[in-house]
Image (cartoon, rainbow, N blue to C red):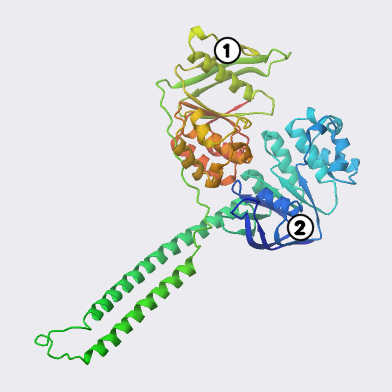
Amino acid sequence: MALINVSNLSFTYEGSFDPVFEDVSFQIDTNWKLGFIGRNGKGKTTFLRLLLGELNYTGSITSDTVFDYFPYRIPEEDFDKTADELMDRWKPGVESWRVLCELNDLRAESEILYRPIRTLSFGERTKVMLAVLFSGENDFLLIDEPTNHLDKNARDIIKEYLKRKKGFILVSHDRDLLDAVIDHVLVLSRASIEVQAGNFSSWWENKQKADSFAISENEKHRKEISKLKASADRVGRWADKSEGTKIGFDPVKENDRSISTRSYIGAKTRKMEARVKSFEKRIGREIEEKEGLLKDIENVTDLKLQPLTHHKKRLLECRDFSLQYHDSTTPVVQNLTFELNTGEIVFLQGENGCGKSSLIKAILDLNRRNTISDEAGEPPVNYTTTGTLTLAGGLIISYISQDTSHLKGNLSDYADANNLDYTLLLSLLRKLDLERVQFEKEMEDFSEGQKKKVLIASSLITGAHLYIWDEPLNYIDVFSRMQIEKLIETYSPTMLIVEHDKTFTENLATKVVTF
C-alpha cells in the first residue's frame, strides 16, 4: 500500500484565464479502485497528465508509486506494427508470458498480439492494451475511458476483468461499469474535488441528499437576509428622520424643545446609525458564511425537445431484410425483421461489425431517395438489399453520427451551414455544461465529448418525426447522460438508437432489436 498526496494543486493552461485546478488537496490510496467522475472539459484527463508529469503545475503531488496510462498512444507510422513489437515501448521490461495470461483473462485470442494494430478492432485494441497495462507490478494505473466504441459483450468482459483488479483510477461515464468495478470515487465538482468511499450510485444518492439540504439551508438563509435587510432599512429611515429634526423647530408647536436638545437628537441618531452599521455587518457576515453554499451543486438542468407528429403510426418496417456490400461475399445484415411505431424508442444491439450502422445507412439513403425528385436520379450506393425496408412518406429524420471529424470552424458558421438557430444552439450547449469560453474556439479544438455535445444539441433543436442516434454517448459525461435520459423520458420522441450504455438502455428502451 502507498499513498498519493495532492497538496495545494493549481494548474491553468497557457493562454487561459480560468484555472483547471485551484489550491486543491486530497489523498488517495494506491490499493483503491477509484472511479474518476466529472463533466466534460473539467480536467479529468488533465489530472492524469499531471500525475504522469507531462504538465507543469504549482503545489505538490507526492508518491513512491509508478504510473502507467491507458490508452497507449500510437503514432500513425506504428499502426502497421504488432502489439508484440510495441509493448516494450509501452511498458519497458514487460514480459510476454504475463501479457498472454492477461489476454486469457480478457477472453482474447493470443494471436491478436501478433497482428498489425491497424487490423485490430476497437475491442481487440482495448484488450491488448489492458493486457500490457496490467502486466507490471506495483504500478498505479490510469485508465481513461476503456469502453468507448465497444459493444455490450466487450464491455461486459472489460467489466468482469476490472472487477478482479485493484490499484487504478478509472475515468468512465458508464454508470453500470462504475457501479460494478469501483470502491471509491474521486469527483470533480463545480468548485472542489472530493474523495468518497463507495460506487457512483452511492455517491450520487449522498450528493442528492447533500444538495437538497444545501438548497433548504440556502432558502432559510435568503429569508434571514431579507428580514435583516428590512430591519436595517427601517432603522435607517428612523435615523434619517431623527437627523432631519435636529435643526429647526416650531417653538409654538414644540414648546418643550430648545437649541440644547440638538445634541441629544444627534446622540440618538448616532446610536441608530450604529445599529444600521451593525445590521449591515451582520448581513455581510451571513452572506460570507453562506457564500458558495450552492456553487458545488451539480444541477442536471432539464432540456427541451419538440418532436414532430407524423400522420402515420408506423414509421419504419423492416421485414426479412438483408444488406450486402459490393466488395463482400457475405451479407452484413441478414433476415432482419422489426417495425418502429410512433412514440417507440428502439435500441439496436449486437457486436461491433454486425450491421447496425449499415442498417442506419440504408434507412437514411432510402429516406433521401423518397424526398428527392425523380429528375435528380437516385444517389449511388455500394451495397445491394433484399427483403423489405419501408419508411413513411414525408418523414423528417434527425441523425447523429458516430463520426465527429466533420466538425470544423466556429459554431456560428456551423449553425448557418446546418440551418440551425444559433442562439438556441448556444443556449442548449450551456445547459449541457459547455463553457462560454468554448463558443469562441474552433470546433476542431474541442474535446471529443464537447464535439458530441454539439451533435446532440443540433439534433435536439431540430424538429423531426424520427431521431436516429448512432452511439451518441461516447465521451459524454455521466451528468449529461442523465439530462438526455430525462429529456427522452419526458417527451417520448420516436427514436432508433445504437448505444451500449446498459443503464441508459434499460431506462429508456421500449423495444430492443438484437442483431
SS at mark 1? loop
Q: Secondary structure at mark 2?
A: loop
Q: Nearer the viewer, mark 1 or mark 2?
A: 1
Residue 31: image location, x then y, percent: 76, 57
Q: Is residue 27 left or right of residue 90?
A: left
Circle 1 Cα neighbour tier, 10 Å, few/some/many (<14 / 14–19 / ≥20) = few
- The residue that label 2 is drawn on is 30
Label 1, on which residue?
A: 379
User: Residue 463 in the image: x percent, y percent?
Assistant: 44, 29
Question: Measured from the top left, where is residue 259 in percent x and y?
Answer: 20, 90
Give the CA separation, mark 1 to mark 2. Answer: 57 Å
Q: Is residue 435 visible?
A: no
In the figure, is residue 260 to the left or right of 133?
left
Q: Eyeballing the image, is 35 above or below 364?
A: below
What residue is at 61 percent from the left and 38 percent from the top?
501
Task: Say which quadrant the C terminus sits in.
Answer: top right
Q: Name the residue located 48 percent from the left edge and 61 percent from the top edge.
A: 214
In the current view of this chain or complex, which residue is farthest to the top?
Answer: 375
Indicate the amino acid at tag 1: Pro
Q: Is residue 102 left or right of residue 203?
A: right
Q: Is residue 355 visible?
A: yes
Image position of 240 with respect to 147: above or below:
below
Is residue 492 shown above or below 130? Answer: above
